[in-house]
């Protein structure tokens, strides 16, 4: 299982406290249109329903049965078949991980460090937090940022193998 020492979590919390980074993502309601997006595909097109409508990519090649991907602390999740859609709500960071037959989508909202378990292969993410939210980070085994993701609105792919934790707004 992928996990880093509790002391590093405390150290990260001290850094957050010292730098004044907010401890929660902004939940402010904003009048934004929804966007339809194929992850890894064409540019988004406007869609009026609230949030971002995301189309899950095809199943990855060579990835059969996998261990169940999880996250701690727990968040809302959804299983999405390849080619199906889901909405990444306004204010959320959504991450897709292949779970054998479906993409398991994790909906991260609170600004904290989430430990990830059994996240392997290439996956996708959609940053739909408020435009004022801090930058998301993918963290490695020592709790050190290994990849900085763009501020909202943004999306892309990620190699989940070296990722041990995610902070949607580090």
Image (cartoon, helix red, strand yellow):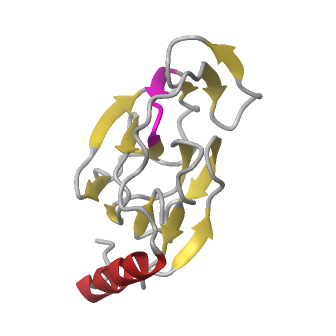
Asked whether residue 99 is in view, the answer is no
User: Is residue 85 covered in magenta?
Assistant: yes
The stretch of residues the image draws in magenta is: 84-92
**Left-right relation of 17 to 61:** left
Judge from the rendering whether residue 149 lies leftward or rightward of residue 56; answer left or right: right
In the rendered view, would you say 89 is above or below 99?
Answer: above
Q: Position of residue 65 (x, y in %)?
A: 36, 46
Could you say which quadrant of the image residue 22 lies in? bottom left
User: Residue 55: horizontal and vertical position, in percent?
Assistant: 56, 25
Count of picture labels: 0
* Front position in the image: 87 or 69: 87
User: Residue 52, percent across and down?
Assistant: 55, 26
Please tell me which residue is depicted at 37% across the width and 43% down the height of the picture: 106
Residue at position x 55%, y 27% in the image: 54
Tell which of 48 and 98 is nearer to you.
Answer: 48
Rendered position, 2 above or below 127: below
Q: Is residue 2 above or below residue 102?
A: below
* Residue under the point 55% across and 46% down: 124
Residue 81 visible somewhere in the drawing: yes
118 or 170: which is nearer to us? 170
Residue 78: x and y in percent read 33, 32
Residue 6: within the magenta?
no
Q: Residue at the far right: name it.
A: 43
* 85 w.r.t. 7: above or below: above
Q: Nearer the viewer, residue 158 or 60?
A: 158
User: Which residue lies at the image location 71% right of the left edge and 25% below the top edge?
Assistant: 44
Image quadrant in which the N terminus is located: bottom left
């Amino acid at each position: 299982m992928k996990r880093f020492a509790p002391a590093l979590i405390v150290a990260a919390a001290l850094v957050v406290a010292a730098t004044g980074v907010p401890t929660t993502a902004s939940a402010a309601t904003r009048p934004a249109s929804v966007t339809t997006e194929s992850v890894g595909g064409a540019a988004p097109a406007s869609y009026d329903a609230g949030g971002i409508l995301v189309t899950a990519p095809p199943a990855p090649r060579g990835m059969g049965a996998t261990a169940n991907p999880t996250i701690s602390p727990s968040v809302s999740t959804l299983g999405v078949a390849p080619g199906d859609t889901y909405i990444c709500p306004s204010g959320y960071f959504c991450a897709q991980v292949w779970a054998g037959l479906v993409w398991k989508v994790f909906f991260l909202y609170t600004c904290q460090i989430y430990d990830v378990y059994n996240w392997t292969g290439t996956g996708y993410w959609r940053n739909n937090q408020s435009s004022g939210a801090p930058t998301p980070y993918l963290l490695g085994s020592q709790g050190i940022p290994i990849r900085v993701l763009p501020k909202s609105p943004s999306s892309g792919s990620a190699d989940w193998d070296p990722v041990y934790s995610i902070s949607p707004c580090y």
